[in-house]
Every structure is written in structure tokens, then in C-alpha cells.
Amino acid sequence: MPMSESTFQRLPTFRLEDYFSRWEFTARHHLTASDAQSMSIGELLALGSDDDRAAFDTLGLGYVETRGGDPLREAVAATYDACEPQDILMFAGAEEAIFWVMQLAVEPGDHVIVPVPNYQAFEAIPLAAGAEVTGVPLVDTESGWTIDLDDVRGALRPNTRVIGMNFPHNPTGAVLDPARWQDLVDLCEERGIRLVSDEVYRGVERDAARRLPQAADLSPTAVSINVMSKAYGLPGLRVGWVASRDHAFLDLLERHKHYTSICNAGPSEFLATVALRAGDRIRDRNRDIVAANVPLVDDLFARYADLLSWHPPVGGSVAFARYHGPEGANRFCRELVEQAGVLLLPSEIYCTPLSDVPDRYFRIGVGRRSVPAGLTALDAHLGRR
Ligand SMILES: Cc1ncc(COP(=O)(O)O)c(C=O)c1O
């Protein structure tokens, strides 16, 4: 094949990350955070044993294994039913995992289906790799956000190689019901399509019964992507992973990881292992924070019902709420951050070549303890209008 046919294209601006570069660390109230409440190294180590604390103090700072050290891969594998440590490959965050998975799962000319709106890397990477990509919309229905499996079936082509999914979904907080999730897994298996499932928000479903089984447990060719950033609230570790029983694909990913991060940071691996062993406690804490914040948002939105409405997240810590004012959500969000220092993500952030999101949505995050203060500032801004 001539070089040009397989050349990876330049990537477009990552609209969400670009907006965050401007505002994430300057706005007074980050009311759109997708990562749950974080903690300090001291708080995290307090969840471990005396041996953990002593071992962290004397930890060496050499390279670690590209696949991830044994204790970490064992702790990750323990979060799956069918996956073993040899089915796990660590990455620097979910972002590096998406970068390689969505590139290497396709050849130029292959077809990929992804949800829209989405975390932009999910569509930008396969597009840059020369794939054709179709977006299947999350639909805002009376009973909540959902994806219609008939839309997924309707988007199928003979050359569809990958279906990407993301439940709990960013930005809508939607979770498919388990029967339809299994239908999707079956559909992929029947057609020889690889299911790539971004599960980074799994574990903070408000009703634990809505937690879906992980794709890599359900199908031997599926790929589950996960990370310490969201449900565990530890994005600063930059520890993510891929779980898959398809070892040929894991080997391919590993050979490409040699060109990006090579391996994780050793201290991060250590701390991630401690966090995973205390995983239930951390996720329960974060679920409680979401559960405490949702009624506060309900309350505020009820008082401004002419302007604001939402479906609370079924899973994860973000929701895609509606703004009904005449100036639209984009202008509302910009004025809000400029005048009141409250950061929300306007719908334009989610407009991409695959998706034209109407100017009436914004993303709100409900996974942090700072949410009440952000809502108070939002309330004051609305009251001044
Ligand atoms: C759906 C989804 N996948 C992946 C990522 C990337 O995660 P990380 O920053 O931990 O690499 C994000 C971050 O917002 C996300 O929302």
C-alpha cells in the first residue's frame, strides 16, 4: 500500500479540552466536572495498609512494565468476571487507550459506528485513521436519554468493523438497559464486529441495579476501556487500561504503546493499586456524593423551570441539561462563566463533523462536593437576570 493511503491525518481541535484549557483552572466554580470527587495522596494511602504506606515511601522511580506491573493488573482483573491479569494492558489514562484502540481496530476504508454526542477522541481518531465513521444519536425522550438499537442496525454497512459505545454515557448520563446491551453484544458477535466499550463512568450508577456487565467479560473480541479518573475520582494518576481476551489485539496495542508513553508512572501504578483494592469504598463514596447533589439540582431547576430542565444521570457524574432561554445555551454558558465564574459546557462543544447539537443543551457535573457552592453561584446569576 502506498504510504499516503495509511497516513494518520492531523487531528482537529479537541473542542472540550480546548474550552477547558481556557476555563478549567480559572473559573471559580467548576460545575461541569466529569471526574468524581478526588482525594489527596495521604487520604488515599489511609485507605491502604501500614505496609502500603511504608512501601510507597521507599518506592523506586525506575521504569515499570509496559503492560503494567503484576499487582496492578491483578487488581484491575479483579474488577472483571471473565478477564484475567493477562487480559489487561495499562495505558496513560483512557485517552491513550482510545488513541490506540480506535486507530488500530480499523484499516483505512473500514466503517465505524459511534454514539453522538461523544467524547471527541472516539470519532476523531478513527476518522484520522482513514475510517468512515457514522454517529448514532443519543435521543432526548420523555423518560430520559437513550440510544435506539434500530438506529445502530440501520447504520450498519458490510464494512463495519467497530461499534464504539460509552455507557454510562458522557455527556447525557444514559445507561442502556441490560437486555438491549446484550442484544448489542450479540449483534457484534454475529457480524464479526469488534465492540469497543468506553466504561470510564461505570461504578457510580445511582441505582446499582443499572450497572452493566463489562463488554470484555461478555465477548472474547470486545475491548473494555477504563480508567482511575472518573468513578474513582483520581484523574491525576493518569492510569487507564484496556481489558480484552483478544491477545493478538492486546499485543498490537502494546507494540504501539512503545511509541507513546512506554509505561505508566510507577508511583501512579502503586497508588492505583491501593485505590482499586479499596474500590468499593471509593465508588460508594462518590455515588453518595452524586445522590446528594441530584436533589439540589432538581430543586434549583424547579425554581427556574421556564429556563432549565434535565434528566439526572442514570450513571456517571454528568448530565446534558436543557436551557430554554431565547439567547440559547451557548451564549448563556459564556455569560455565566464570564460574569459569575461558573463553568458549564455549552452544546457547541459537542458539535463535530458527525453531530450538530441544538443550541439548547449544556453539560453539568454532579460528582463533586463543590457542587452546592456552584449551584448557589448559578442561582445568584439567574436571580440577577
Ligand atoms: C467518555 C470518556 N472517555 C475517556 C475519557 C478520557 O479519560 P482520561 O482523562 O482519564 O484519559 C473521558 C474524559 O473526560 C471521557 O469522558
Image (cartoon, helix red, strand yellow):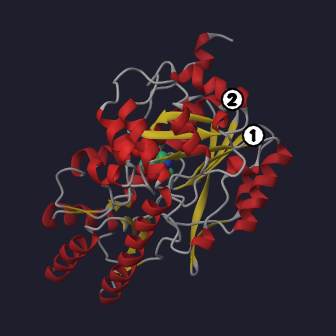
Q: In 3D space, how far apart are the residues under numbered discs 2 and 1 (Cα atoms)?
A: 9 Å
User: Disc number at residue 53?
Assistant: none
SS at circle 2: helix
- Residue under label 2, please give it: 249
- Residue under label 1, please give it: 221
Q: Residue at x 25, y 75 (%)?
A: 372
Q: Residue at x 45, y 57 (%)?
A: 231
- Residue 179 position by quadrant: bottom right
Give coordinates of residue 30: x percent, y percent: 25, 60
The one of 360 and 264 positioned closer to us in this rendering: 264
Q: Is residue 267 left or right of residue 106?
A: left
SS at circle 1: loop
Q: Earlier in the sequence, mark 2 or mark 1?
A: 1
Give coordinates of residue 125: x percent, y percent: 53, 35
Q: Residue at x 68, y 69 (%)?
A: 177
- In the picture shown, does residue 46 fall above or below 59? below
| Quarter that holds the N terminus | top right
- In the picture shown, does residue 226 fall above or below 58? below
Give the farthest residue toward the top: 2
Any part of residue 352 in sight: no
The one of 373 and 72 positioned closer to us in this rendering: 72
Asked whether the residues under the numbered discs 2 and 1 touch, taking CB atoms below 8 Å apart as contact, a structural biologist would say yes
- Residue 246 position by quadrant: top right
| Quarter that holds the C terminus | bottom left
